[in-house]
RNA sequence: GCGAGAGUGGCGGAACUGGCAGACGCGCUGGACUUAGGAUCCAGUGGAGCAAUCCGUAGGGGUUCAACUCCCCUCUCUCGCACCA
């Protein structure tokens, strides 16, 4: 054993050891309790970044810990390998996307192994391989059969620069999320998945997500956006048309003073004579700055009270939500109020807040949007909003004017992408038979190789004759193959199910899936809080309905890790600076005073990134892992600190040093004999107690929300005590041995290589991860003496050492008799004495 | 605007069901060992004060013997959603 801790040597040694013995491999074993630990798989962009390091360090500690706790742990990893960067690289560098992707995977896999992560690579998933995406295609066929996949023409967000369709959520501030180019609207035939059919179930399921962060659940609910209300038809005078509106406030129906249509509403063209004006409003559609509209010249009839109200077109009415038309109640809706003010439309109060309180129309400065008591509402006047809603809806339904309706913000999932590097949608277009699904036996539909990547025009798939030309399976005639590929969110919506079986096993092996699913702990970034998680929940439900999974909820517990941040530097002239461009607080380029910016998420653009590779070279995996777990609890943001890494380094060095110093004695100390230790020296008794206390503390911290930072802190405390320990006799050494072994067992999930190496150095046989997590003995953890805090009127006045478990009465007596306390209390009347067992006595005097 | 979260030493962060505020680490100060120290080890380290003591968890109220913790109000910051009828 070397005197100095040399991570290079030992990390490689143990990585080889684990790989050669297959220690990270897992098998389905119904006789054992399983634990499925999953981290979000990365996009193979080239190399790992600090966010990955943190994510995977957290996951690996959990996996290793659970293994030591006796669980049969599934801990897989793979690659979210389809996507635009590969294609962009192909355009730029002429590399085939597959080559670029697989080379990246090779490199990144080495990086992950270098971190000492305990993955079972036999289950590795690579979504761009035909063996994987054939199942995307298979699911698609099943969805088609169940009418859960359909084609429709719609306006889509189109990025002219990437030449592709974007999902709503891929549009950021009107620009493409990847390249920032302005997004335009384009009409295309698209494939959609009917996720809305599961809207209610997905919403209901949210309440069962007790292992998820509240805010993620809130985001899911918000996204689904359920609202209850009614649809009501307003006949348009003299046309025979009806305008169907959606409202959540049927209680305000008597307050309607006009009706608004979205500029793209199907009736709009017919009602508006001035087409130019309509175009002008269309151009302002969805723009938030100002409400714009026009009067169509037509009137509609409020079916509830027969009132005649003007029909308007308004830019703020969205075609995508509800019916694309609204009833406007300016007194009770702020948007309608603003619109009414601008165009001088009447405001009619029909709800009075709470108990009375006069509010009259003309004096209003804003709408009252709350509930209250109905007025000016015919025979519904005097009712409370809640009651009125029910009664009015019933009336509307009874008279056939409309119906109760539940609306969702959630839209069907458009999965078509006009790109090459994705799963081909397995459909053919036959001149005679129309849309024909590719038969299952012909799967997978493989991406062709004979294409070029120019970045111009549409999908490169258009130019592959071999790909395009197909034979219709139903009539045998000529057919054209679909050239759209699937959104990559399809790939990631079920990869956790693929992991349940090894690469050489059936992808949908029911036995494996029912054993491993659901994922017990999922760990990843908050950026996937809505879509990836929602799509996975949807997909898992569909698979359940296909009989593949037992239940619809894929992730029992979710941990959203915080971001990795670092301070930034700015120069007034040169913008963001790399840390090495700052010398003595000045910009190295121009000498101007550099400004220390805020601590921000690491990003290339802000020049505050740290490359994990450099850290691995300099400090090794264990130190890198340890620091990223110690600096903050996993769910919070972590501020990177070079100095802090040094601290982790010093700590592991200290552990190494202690084992090095005592290795011979400890080896000789032999067997445990814990039960029959002879009377111990004071320091040995203290160390034994501290050891058991630390086992308790570390175990509780890990079990409680994975608070590794405090767990590591208590290990540091124990190691500090070990540093000061000077064993004298055999008993002292026996306790030292016990304590050291426990330190290593608890440290191993965090610093696995060091754990193994020192375990071996102490003379133990086999991998440390084959040994169980230590258990504490409550009796041995108990303090014999405790410090009793004595307060007078809540202020700290004295501290006494007393035997643990001292009866309250005795504690009270000792506190009052303490000379210092006696002096303070002297001459005053003791009103009350509060005793908190083993902690504190508070003497209350008057 | 709505929703979620945060605010504690010079810094990252502890304090679990109300019970010694500041564990642990970084930094800093002093010392030891050293040719040397940006290595290592030891000691100290919330602020004010010679001291007894006083003041301290964004700010202001309250409940309590006792409040970082519970209640009310206000401020600041972060994230998400946002003309969703």
Image (cartoon, grey):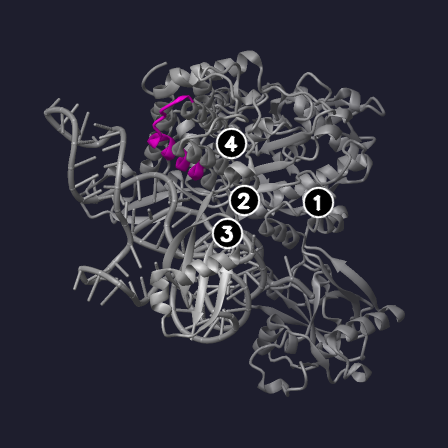
Residue on which the image places disc 2: A526
Q: Which mark is residue A56?
A: 4
Residue extending farthest to the top is A20
Whole-number angstrom distance, CA of label 1 to CA of label 4:
42 Å
Q: Quadrant of the image for the N terminus of chain A?
A: top left
Where's residue A747, x and y in %? 47, 29
Give how far apart the Cα atoms at labels 1 and 2 are.
33 Å
Q: Quadrant of residue A130?
A: top right
Q: A233 above or below A57?
A: below
- Label 2–label 4 contact, CB within 8 A: no
Neighbour tally class for label 1: few under 14, some 14-19, many 20 plus, Cα within 10 Å: few
Chain that bears disc 3 = A
Q: Which residue is mark 3?
A: A806
Label 1 or label 4, whichever comes before in sequence order? 4
Q: Could you tell me which secondary element the residue under label 1 belongs to?
A: strand
Circle on res. A684: none
Marks 3 and 2 sit apart, C-alpha to C-alpha, by 49 Å
Quarter of the image with the C terminus of chain A in it: bottom left
Q: Which mark is residue A153?
A: 1
Residue A720 on the magenta segment: yes
Q: Which residues are magenta?
A: A712-730
Same chain for marks 1 and 2? yes
Query: Comparing marks 2 and 4, which lies closer to the viewer?
Result: 4
Observer-side mark, 4 or 3, equals 3
Q: Position of residue A155 (x, y in %)?
A: 65, 48
Lateral position of residue A256 relative to residue A532, left or right: right
Q: Which comes sooner in the sequence, label 1 or label 3?
A: 1
**Residue A190 in magenta?**
no
């Amino acid at each position: 054993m070397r005197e100095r801790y040399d991570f290079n040597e030992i990390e490689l040694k143990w990585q080889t050891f684990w790989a050669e013995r297959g220690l990270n491999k897992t098998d389905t074993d119904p006789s054992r309790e399983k634990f499925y630990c999953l981290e979000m798989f990365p996009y193979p962009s080239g190399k790992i970044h600090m966010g990955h390091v943190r994510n995977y360090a957290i996951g690996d500690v959990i996996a290793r810990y659970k293994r030591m706790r006796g669980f049969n742990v599934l801990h897989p990893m793979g690659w979210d390998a389809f996507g635009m960067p590969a294609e962009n690289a192909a355009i730029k560098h002429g590399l085939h996307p597959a080559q670029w992707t697989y080379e990246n995977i090779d490199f990144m896999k080495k990086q992950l192994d270098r971190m000492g992560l305990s993955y079972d690579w036999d289950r590795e998933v690579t979504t761009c391989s035909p063996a994987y995406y054939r199942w995307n295609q298979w699911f698609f066929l099943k969805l088609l059969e169940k009418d859960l996949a359909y084609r429709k023409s719609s306006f889509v967000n189109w990025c002219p620069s990437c030449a592709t369709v974007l999902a709503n959520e891929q549009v950021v501030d009107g620009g493409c999320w990847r390249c920032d180019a302005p997004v335009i609207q384009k009409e295309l035939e698209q494939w959609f998945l009917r996720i809305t059919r599961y809207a209610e179930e997905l919403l209901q399921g949210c309440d069962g997500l007790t292992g998820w962060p509240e805010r993620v659940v809130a985001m899911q609910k918000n996204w689904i956006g359920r609202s209850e209300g009614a649809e009501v038809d307003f006949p348009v005078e003299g046309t025979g048309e009806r305008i169907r509106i959606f409202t959540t406030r049927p209680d305000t129906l008597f307050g309607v003073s006009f009706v608004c249509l979205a500029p793209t509403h199907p009736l709009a063209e017919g009602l508006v004579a001035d087409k130019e004006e309509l175009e002008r409003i269309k151009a302002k559609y969805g723009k938030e700055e100002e409400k714009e509209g026009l009067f169509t010249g037509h009137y509609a009839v409020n079916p509830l009270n027969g009132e005649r109200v003007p029909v308007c077109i308004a830019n703020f009415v969205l075609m995508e939500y509800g019916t694309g038309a609204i009833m406007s109640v300016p007194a009770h809706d702020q948007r309608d109020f603003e619109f009414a003010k601008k165009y001088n439309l009447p405001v009619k109060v029909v709800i009075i807040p709470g108990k009375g309180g006069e509010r009259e129309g003309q004096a209003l400065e804003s709408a009252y949007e709350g509930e209250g008591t109905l007025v000016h509402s015919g025979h519904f006047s005097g009712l409370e909003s809640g009651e009125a809603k029910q009664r009015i809806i019933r009336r509307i339904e009874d008279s056939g004017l409309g119906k109760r309706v539940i609306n969702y913000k959630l839209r069907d999932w458009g999965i078509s992408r006009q790109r090459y590097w994705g799963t081909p949608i397995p459909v053919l277009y036959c001149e005679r038979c129309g849309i024909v699904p590719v038969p299952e036996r012909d799967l997978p539909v493989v991406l062709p190789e004979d294409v070029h990547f120019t970045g111009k025009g549409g999908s490169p798939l258009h130019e592959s004759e071999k790909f395009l030309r197909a034979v219709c399976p139903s009539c045998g005639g000529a057919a054209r193959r679909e050239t759209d590929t699937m959104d990559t969110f399809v790939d990631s919506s079920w990869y956790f199910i693929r992991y349940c079986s090894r690469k050489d096993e059936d992808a949908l092996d029911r036995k494996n899936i029912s054993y491993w699913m659901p994922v017990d702990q999922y760990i990843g970034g908050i950026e996937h809080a809505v879509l990836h998680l929602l799509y996975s929940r949807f997909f898992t439900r569909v698979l359940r309905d296909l009989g593949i999974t037992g239940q619809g909820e894929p992730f029992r517990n979710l941990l959203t890790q915080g971001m990795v941040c670092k301070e930034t530097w700015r120069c007034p002239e040169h913008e963001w600076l790399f840390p090495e461009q700052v010398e003595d607080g000045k910009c190295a380029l121009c000498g101007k005073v550099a400004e220390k910016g805020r601590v921000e998420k690491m990003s290339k653009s802000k020049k505050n990134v740290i490359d994990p590779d450099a850290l691995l070279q300099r400090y090794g995996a264990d130190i890198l892992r340890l620091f990223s777990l110690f600096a903050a609890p996993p769910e919070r943001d972590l501020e990177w600190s070079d100095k802090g890494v040094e601290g982790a380094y010093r700590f592991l060095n200290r552990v190494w040093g202690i084992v090095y110093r005592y290795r011979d004695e400890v080896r000789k100390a032999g067997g445990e004999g814990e039960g029959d230790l002879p009377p111990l020296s004071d320091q040995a008794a203290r160390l034994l107690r501290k050891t058991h206390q630390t086992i308790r503390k570390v175990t509780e911290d890990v079990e409680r929300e994975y608070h590794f930072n405090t767990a590591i802190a208590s290990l540091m405390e124990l190691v500090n005590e070990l540093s000061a320990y000077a064993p004298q006799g055999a008993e002292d050494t026996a306790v030292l041995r016990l304590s050291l072994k426990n330190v290593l067992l608890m440290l191993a999930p965090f610093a696995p290589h060091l754990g193994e190496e020192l375990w071996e150095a102490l003379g133990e046989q086999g991998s440390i991860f084959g040994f169980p997590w230590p258990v504490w003995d409550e009796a041995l953890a108990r303090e014999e003496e405790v410090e009793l805090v004595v307060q007078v009127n809540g202020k700290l006045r004295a501290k006494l050492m007393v035997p643990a478990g001292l009866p309250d009465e005795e504690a009270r007596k000792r506190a009052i008799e303490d000379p210092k306390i006696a002096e303070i209390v002297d001459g005053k009347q003791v009103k009350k004495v509060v005793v908190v067992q083993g902690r504190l006595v508070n003497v209350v005097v008057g």
